[in-house]
Amino acid sequence: MREKIIKILTELRPEFDFNEDVDFIDEGMLDSFDVVNLVTELDSTFEISIDGVDILPENFASIDSIEKLLIKNGAK
Amino acid sequence: MDFVFKNKRIGGILTILPKKVVKFEEEMGNYSFSPAKCMKLKLAMGYKEHRIAEPGQCSSDFCKFGLQYLFDNDLLKKEEIDALLFVSQSADYYMPPTSNIIHGHFELKHDCLCMDINQGCAGFELGLIQAFMLLEQPSINKVILMNADVLSPKVSDRDRNSKPLIGDAASITIVEKSDDDSTIYANIKMDGTGAFALNIPAGGFRMPSTSETSVMEQDDAGNYRSKDNLVMQGDDVFNFVQREVPPMIEHLLEQADVQKEDVDWYMFHQPNKFMLNKLADKLGVPREKMPANIVENFGNASGVTVPTCISFNLGEQLTDKTMKLCMAGFGVGLTWSSIYMKMGNLLFNNIVEF
């Protein structure tokens, strides 16, 4: 799952290294429109629909938080 | 707050759109995004083109054109109009009320109630609830509900949060008494603590427009706008909608004792495709039952999007069939409202261009 997440993030913003241990939102690596595109890609890749109430910046701040979000929303 | 009405119906819906079409690609050079990122934004949000009024065209001009169309085509008689409601955030003047200006333009009868209501995204539902309440009076048999907004002049060309989705339009809905005693269920909620999630800071009495309020400033996301421009806190509005709208719809249908799958159409306000798809998924409603094609074709004209959605997607089907509709509006205020009702045998349900 982590590899797939990193691949999607890198395709979205190729100028950043998403393996770094930083806050993607605070560091400006993802803005709100990136999050929209990211959710669309994650939904499609993992065949889920991330709950709208979970689309909050803190859930997209790191690989760990994205992984937790996916598992909460039924990704396998 | 819940409402129940009987013996009321919608008699016809006319949507009036500007002729001018502006494509997303024509404007994306103004946004501080690369062309590739703009195209991703276009796909995710469903931006394609929007309808924009010509300079000098006001909301009332679209309403006058629509009413004249109805009079000319014998779809409405002047003497039948007992109340004229104008729901908008873009009135012609501070005073007089725009509904009175329209009343005067057509020299309507003096026994007619004119009312302006300042409301946006939930303006169709709020207007219908108000119309249904007026129809409880013996002296009122037919209410003309006008939803209209020409807000594009208030949106900065360099604001990618709002510019790609804004649209100008008006709708005229005939609301009248009926022998049909099927129940109409409605509800509305407000949260004024979020009043500034969508706002235009300057131009009212609190902060009059001056040369200072017209200075363009850059926000954290790279958008440029002045205090005379519309501001939308997009993230806050998105979270509010996802949090509040699904339970409102669940409650409405429970009140009406209707199963979700028995509703023919979910005609919701049209902020963008992404938000609507998320609402459909959350509610467990097939996305095809909740059309999300108004922003991409016409733009978001506040309270006009629900009637536009009905006219565009159902058109003549509603002139000879009866369908079960769940309608919802949500946004500025913050306001959120929904209505479940049967709708059909409309005298007209179409779109005209002005």
Image (cartoon, coloured by chain):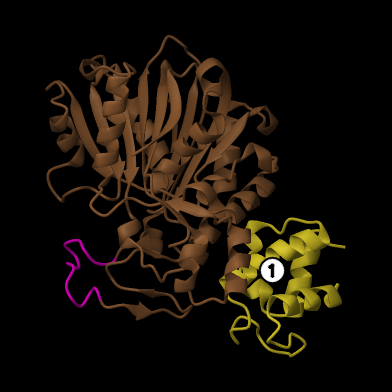
Residue B270 appears anywhere in the view: no
Spot occupied by residue B78 in the image (x, y as percentages of width and height): 22, 19
Specify whether residue B281 is painted magenta.
no
Going by the image, does B248 lie left or right of A63? left
Question: Residue B84 appears in which quarter of the rendering?
Answer: top left
Question: Residue B259 appears in which quarter of the rendering?
Answer: top right
Please tell me which residue is depicted at 14% across the width and 20% down the height of the picture.
B109
Q: Magenta region: which residues?
A: B201-214
Q: Residues within 10 Å of mark 1 (few under 14, many from 20)?
A: many
Q: Is residue B282 above or below residue B128?
A: below
Q: Which chain is represented by brown in the image?
A: B
Going by the image, does B152 lie left or right of B99? right
Residue B63 appears anywhere in the view: yes
Q: Which residue is mark 1?
A: A38
Question: Residue B166 appears in which quarter of the rendering?
Answer: bottom left
Q: Which chain is represented by yellow in the image?
A: A
Q: Is residue B273 above or below residue B212?
A: above
